[in-house]
Image (cartoon, rainbow, N blue to C red):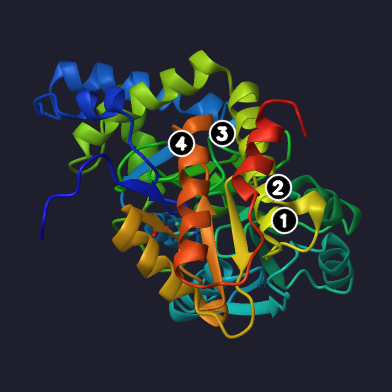
């Protein structure tokens, strides 16, 4: 392959760009994970990660992908055959449903249209009719990365409360944490599931479970088989700065740095930055005359924008051209929207000029690929970002 000058534009909605500050932290020598230096690191990182979830409860850290953290949430708290209420917001919700089914849970699925988020009233109605409390957990994806739709977590908590239902509340914010407003404690989430490679700006390789007291209590009676994912040994070892097996030491160096960066900027500023970039991206898409996959403006994702291709034009062809000509990766359409949707990630360590570079790459790609569109998307984004819209 011939050399390509300049940086690659990694504009998929995770993994996101890893900033130099984090890469430099990760490159430090790996140390003895049973020694005192590591214990200090572990105690520091286990505390520093809590405010990112807005929790005072423990956060369990696994050397894993987000998928592992999904599995951990389920196997620690549920028993074979338990009914779980899951909401199909898109492809990531579908993958979690598939996982739940495979490990022996009875997943009851509320179908979604992949263009809007969770309708809490449907959950409330279903739970209200479950007078025997057969449903043991409600499982929701916060930021559905396959569509660019962000569901309102508090509305689901309120629905569960109105139905006076004891089900555990599990939320996947693998692509939302550190980019979109999220509040584990305030929103009464029992298990928050996340991963390192999206809003946290780290390479892939860490999975997280923030766990409420109710979730820990449920884990004492849960009967699904678990070993690697067992919280008990984590929660017993973590307070002294230990892990039950070898942790991803170098990613933990990076995680300290990521938490410091997010807190230095201020979480609310981080969220506002993401909202602003998302709005600028949508202005560009609208100026191109293309459709946004998310059909509900109050659920637009601050993390990514899903763009619908005009009929007869293939999103993957456009993405291939943009990769080849402009060295930029965009997210593909997943599952049933494959070829029909492409996704622009605008998350993590990201600023105005990176966004404008990404949008320029899309606008040039649309022209080269012969996709019908209007010019001026980048200009619309500039006008918004400079307050001249
Ligand atoms: C990325 C992602 C996952 C899967 O995480 P992996 O690290 O690929 O296992 C799950 N859910 C959502 C919402 C995601 O964005």
Q: Tell me the mark number nearer the camera, choosing from 3 and 4.
A: 4
Counting residues from the N terminus, which is met first, the one under dot 3 or under dot 1?
3
**Which element is circle 4 on?**
helix
Q: Is residue 115 above or below residue 62?
A: below
Which mark, residue 305? none
Inspect this view and state whether residue 199 appears.
no
Q: Mark 2 packing: few (<14 Cα in 10 Å), some, or many (20+)?
A: many
Asked if marks 2 and 1 touch (Cβ < 8 Å), the reply is yes
Counting residues from the N terminus, which is met first, the one under dot 3 or under dot 4?
3
Residue indicated by mark 1? 286
- Ligand 1 lies under 8 Å from the Cβ of mark 1: no
Which mark, residue 354? 4
Q: Is residue 280 above or below residue 142?
A: above
Q: Mark 4 packing: few (<14 Cα in 10 Å), some, or many (20+)?
A: some
Residues at marks 4 and 1, CA–CA distance in whole angstroms: 19 Å
Residue indicated by mark 3? 53
Q: Nearer the viewer, residue 185 or 237?
A: 185
Residue indicated by mark 2? 283
Q: Identify the image quadrant of residue 317.
A: bottom left
Residues at marks 2 and 4, CA–CA distance in whole angstroms: 16 Å
Task: Pinpoint residue 13: horizontal percent, then vertical percent.
Answer: 47, 52
Asked if marks 3 and 1 touch (Cβ < 8 Å), the reply is no
Counting residues from the N terminus, which is met first, the one under dot 2 or under dot 4?
2
Q: Left or right? Give the position of 294 relative to 61.
A: right
**Residue at (36%, 40%) from the top-left corner?**
17
**Which element is circle 1 on?**
helix
Q: Nearer the viewer, residue 49 or 260?
A: 260
């Amino acid at each position: 392959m011939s050399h390509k000058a300049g940086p690659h534009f990694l504009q998929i909605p995770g993994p996101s760009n890893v900033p130099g500050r984090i890469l430099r932290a990760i490159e430090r020598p790996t140390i003895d994970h049973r020694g005192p230096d590591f214990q200090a690191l572990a105690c520091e990182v286990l505390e520093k990660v809590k405010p990112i979830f807005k929790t005072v409860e423990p956060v369990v850290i696994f050397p894993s992908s987000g998928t592992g953290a999904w599995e951990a949430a389920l196997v620690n708290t549920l028993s074979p055959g338990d009914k779980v209420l899951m909401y199909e917001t898109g492809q990531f919700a579908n993958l979690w449903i598939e996982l739940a089914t495979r490990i022996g849970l009875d997943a009851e699925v509320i179908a979604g249209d992949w263009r809007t988020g969770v309708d809490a009233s449907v959950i409330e109605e279903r739970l209200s009719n479950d007078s025997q409390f057969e449903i043991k957990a409600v499982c929701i994806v916060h930021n559905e990365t396959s569509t660019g739709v962000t569901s309102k977590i508090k509305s689901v908590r309120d629905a569960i409360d109105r139905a006076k239902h004891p089900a555990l509340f599990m939320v996947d914010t693998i692509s939302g944490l550190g980019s979109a407003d999220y509040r584990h404690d305030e929103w009464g989430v029992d298990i928050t599931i996340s991963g390192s490679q999206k809003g946290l700006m780290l390479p892939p390789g860490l999975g997280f479970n923030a766990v409420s007291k109710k979730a820990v209590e449920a884990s004492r009676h849960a009967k699904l088989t678990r070993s690697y994912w067992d919280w008990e040994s984590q929660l017993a070892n973590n307070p002294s700065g230990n892990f039950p097996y070898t942790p991803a030491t170098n990613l933990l160096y990076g995680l300290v740095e990521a938490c410091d960066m997010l807190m230095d900027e201020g979480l609310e500023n981080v969220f506002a930055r993401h909202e602003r970039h998302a709005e600028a991206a949508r202005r560009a898409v609208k100026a191109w005359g293309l459709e946004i996959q998310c059909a509900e403006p109050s659920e637009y994702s601050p993390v990514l924008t899903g763009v619908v291709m005009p009929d007869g034009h293939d999103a993957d062809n456009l993405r291939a051209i943009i990769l080849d000509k402009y060295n930029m990766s965009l997210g593909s359409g997943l599952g049933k929207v494959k070829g029909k949707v492409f996704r622009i990630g605008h998350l993590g360590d990201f600023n105005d000029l990176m966004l404008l570079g990404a949008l320029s790459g899309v606008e040039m790609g649309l022209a080269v690929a012969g996709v019908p569109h209007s010019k001026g998307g980048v200009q619309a984004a500039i006008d918004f970002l400079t307050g001249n819209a």
